[in-house]
Amino acid sequence: MVAETVEPTTAAPYIAGDEAVLRVENLTKHFVKKRLGRPTTAVKAVSDVSFDLAPGETLGLVGESGCGKTTLSRLILRLIEPTSGRVIVEGKDVTRLSKRQLREFRQRVQVVFQDPYASLDPRQRVAASVAEPLTNSKLSSDEKLRIVHETLERMGLQRAQARLFPHQFSGGQRQRIGIARALSVTPKVLLLDEPVSALDVSIQAQVLKLLQELRDEYRLSYILISHDLSVVRHVSDRVMVMYLGRVVEMAPKEELYTAPRHPYTASLLSAAPVPDPDVERTRERIQLLGDPPNPASPPPGCAFHRRCFQAELVAQKLGDSEVTVLEDGRRVPRTCAEKQPVLVTQDATKHWSACHFPLSREAVATVTA
Ligand SMILES: Nc1ncnc2c1ncn2[C@@H]1O[C@H](COP(=O)(O)OP(=O)(O)OP(=O)(O)O)[C@@H](O)[C@H]1O
Ligand code: SF4
Ligand SMILES: [Mg+2]
């Protein structure tokens, strides 16, 4: 596989400028484990993540289990404090808000979780669940009930169902209630953490369609976390790929799916099933070696170097002095084993990747068709 030779430029991967509804700057969360009251190891769950979100945009967020997706969304929601970095919502730094300001901020950024049953209190009637984000508002009970009824109706439910309990609904209906609750405060940003993965495939399609309609109707911005790459491709405008707490690639969706530059992205795409059975049978697959490393002790250099097919291919063309031999005998470029790549862009397509030897379009065409 051939590496591209365009000179890269480094800067944060921002596209929305002053329009940005959300801007994340160098966000980092290291969970420090303590033993006998003393800090021992730090789990580097999120490291130096920067991106922004335009009004009405959907940013897909993908990566293997444990790469930091949920931690990133909890940081954005200010459910946990960052180790460093900032979160800017509609121009305001929400990492420095007073309690009152934090309550207002929570009306602007809402979340929909994976499991609609776990996220709804089984002892609470639907009306109370949907009205929960309105608790601190100055609205009267009648006004709150009106909002609950209107929001439920927009979700395709009936206002009379507000009196029922969560167990009286199907999974798809419960997820609609979860979305209604998030929307009751008219937010600008919705964080969708695996919003359809607990649902049947046919219901998934309905809920995704509803989310797209709501986004366009209210000009909402979404961050969509999903393990299902076809869901992300279907719904997103841009896609961000995380590996071991860091962003390794970010690009407009079609660009990312058809011409990934980072070998990790290419491996994820290659592992995902393709709907066309002929293509599925005949295509070449990239093997993703082993499991992700422990985020408490990430490997030096590029965190992906022990699993990377591209590193091995590049090493074949290098002399011994430029190569590091791994414990299992595989050879990778010394640069990959020693130097951490930074996120750079190589052209004006808003395509960013963090790899010393990014893939060329031609190389990728054979494995991600
Ligand atoms: N409160 C915590 N204390 C210590 N470590 C944590 C905590 N929360 C998350 N982690 C660790 O941080 C890393 C990232 O976890 P996170 O839940 O963000 O991953 P994820 O990408 O959402 O995974 P999944 O796809 O399985 O949901 C993991 O190694 C996890 O064990
Ligand atoms: S920097 Fe090296 S090890 Fe890391 S993804 Fe690129 S080629 Fe692979
Ligand atoms: Mg998660």
Image (tube, grey):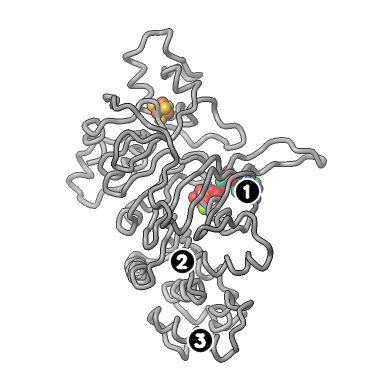
Q: Are marks 1 and 3 in contact (CB under 8 Å)?
A: no
Residue under numbered circle 2: 188
Quadrant in the picture for residue 200: bottom left
Residue 159 in percent (x, y) is at 45, 89
The amino acid marked with disc number 3 is Ala
Q: Secondary structure at mark 2?
A: loop
State the quadrant of the C terminus: top left
Foreground mark, 1 or 2, reads 2
Residue under numbered circle 3: 162
Residue under numbered circle 1: 82
Residue closest to the eye, 301 or 264:
301
Residue 235 in percent (x, y) is at 33, 59
Foreground mark, 2 or 3, reads 2
Quadrant in the picture for residue 95: bottom right
One can see residue 256 in this view: yes
Pointer 1 or 2: first along the chain: 1
